[in-house]
Image: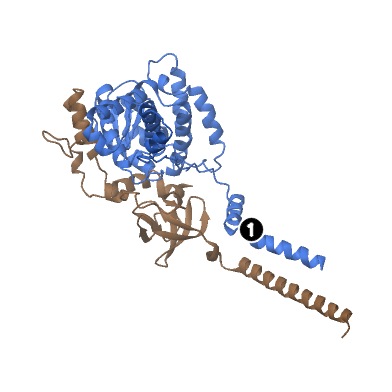
Amino acid sequence: MKRIMVLGSFTLVCMCFPATAMSGFLDSLLQPAPKQNVDRPAQEKVAEEQPGLLDGIGGLFGVKKSEIDLVKKGVGVVEALQPIGEEEEIVLGEAVAVEAFSRFGGEYSNKDWNRYINLVGKTIVEVSDRPNLNFHFAILNSQEQNAFAAPGGYIFITVGLLKALKNEAELGGVLAHEIAHVTKRHMLDTIRRGAVLGSVSELSLAAMKQDPKMFSNAIEQMTDLLFTKGLDKGKEFEADVVGLDYAYRAGYHPQGLKDYLQTLAKEEGHAKSRFFTTHPSTTERISKINTVLNGYSDIQGLPFLTARFQQYVKAE
Amino acid sequence: MTPFNHQKKQKHIGDSFIIHLLFTVIIMLFSIIVLPSTSWAETWYAKQDGVKVTAEKSSSSALVETLSLGDAVTVLSKTGRVFKVKTKKGKNGWVFKFRLSDKEPSSDSGPGLSSLIGRNTIAARESRAGGSIRGLKETTAQYANDKKIGQEHRDAVDRMGAFTLTTDDLMEFKKSGHLGEFSGDAQ
């Protein structure tokens, strides 16, 4: 009897073990794949204001109106943390893009190079976590080595940086890092948190049209972040990891970004670039990227496409 | 019938029930193990329009079907950078796995990429002489006016937004570099 019970228990355990978990387990044994970093931004809890409720309760307990207003203002701040919609994101991004051209020497006019960076960029976007967002890529006429991502998929690379690259995998690595900033909504997340400080109360499309000053403030905050202060270190590291994975998915050797950062590290302390003040130290980034690269087991055959890069971006 | 015999018979009936139950469970477990893998296969979804299902692992092989955003497929097996799938139309083929998602795309996923780059002309690439090709948004134009940002920078954003690539151009670029769905071909 005891034997029957033991056998029965074992059978039931086998039955209850989820099939999906089993297949995942077997997959990882048969084909160890690198961890895909496709986590979605966490949904934040948003408190809902209930008009009249606070006034009513406050009145019952004899709380002054000014104090009630303060509490209501607090609730309004939590409301400002609501995610910014894609339409609003594109509207904000377009205005930031005008600033990018204005501050970094304008457009670098070269149709072939422009087409090339768009081809590389779109190849990566297709395998990213926002493949249906229409990304745009442009070259800025500045010798300073830098790259930016404005919300809504406006990606910039300076001609100085483009010329410093050695191959297409490096270009793919740089663009993938910027694409990751957009897919992870890093700028929007930062600006939403900035809203807590009270400078921005609502970023709806209607509000942006009705209140140009508020819109202007939002753009100023973003350009300040993008061109002066930089995003926080955590977001930069996340963009490195996610971007590296996008480059890998697109078929580039994911070492591209690291190779470029090594070139850049040699210039750190010598070259004058805002890149160094808006990004964490390149040595620290390289070290973290090395750890991530060790997790990829099937990258040996992936291309760097040096010849094609040289063919498109000839040294002047 | 003595009470002793009655108890013995009840015990016998109880054992018999457990044995039958166990036998049924074992048969079910056996069936699960030997059932075709399709019974346990996962459902994945096309992340965008224009996802190719090909006859062989190589994306250069014959086209079996083209998936649209949100189309579900049953994954039959996983190998390297491709999945063997069965489409809703009952066709079997191979798909580049990074253009599939294990989560069903939400309704606000927007238009497929093909609708954005699928035009057969690249007219928008040409620079404009006077008026806007696409036109900046009202908010951007207002902002640029307020900040006195030069017209050339506004035009640059306009050109940037209007630039398009053809599907064929992108496909050829990926193919020649062994990228995207062609990346497995080189390995």
Residue at 27% in and 28% down: A214
Where is residue A276 shown, x and y percent of the image? 42, 20
> Which chain does the residue under circle 1 lie in?
A
Tell me the element at label 1.
Answer: loop
Looking at the image, residue B123 lies above or below residue B43: above
Return the x and y of residue A18 as percentages of the image width and height.
60, 58
From the top left corner, tell me how far across and down residue A208 is, in percent.
25, 34
Which residue is label 1 attached to?
A: A17
Quadrant assignment for the C terminus of chain A: top left
Which chain comes out brown in the rendered image?
B
- For badge 1, the amino acid type reads Phe
| Colour of the chain lettered A | blue
Location of residue A181 with respect to B28 vertically, above or below: above
Q: Residue furthest top?
A: A270
Residue A57's place in the image compared with B104, above or below, is above
> Which quadrant is home to the N terminus of chain A?
bottom right
Residue A165 image offset from top left, x and y in percent = 39, 28
Number of callouts: 1
Locate residue A305: give its quadrant. Answer: top left
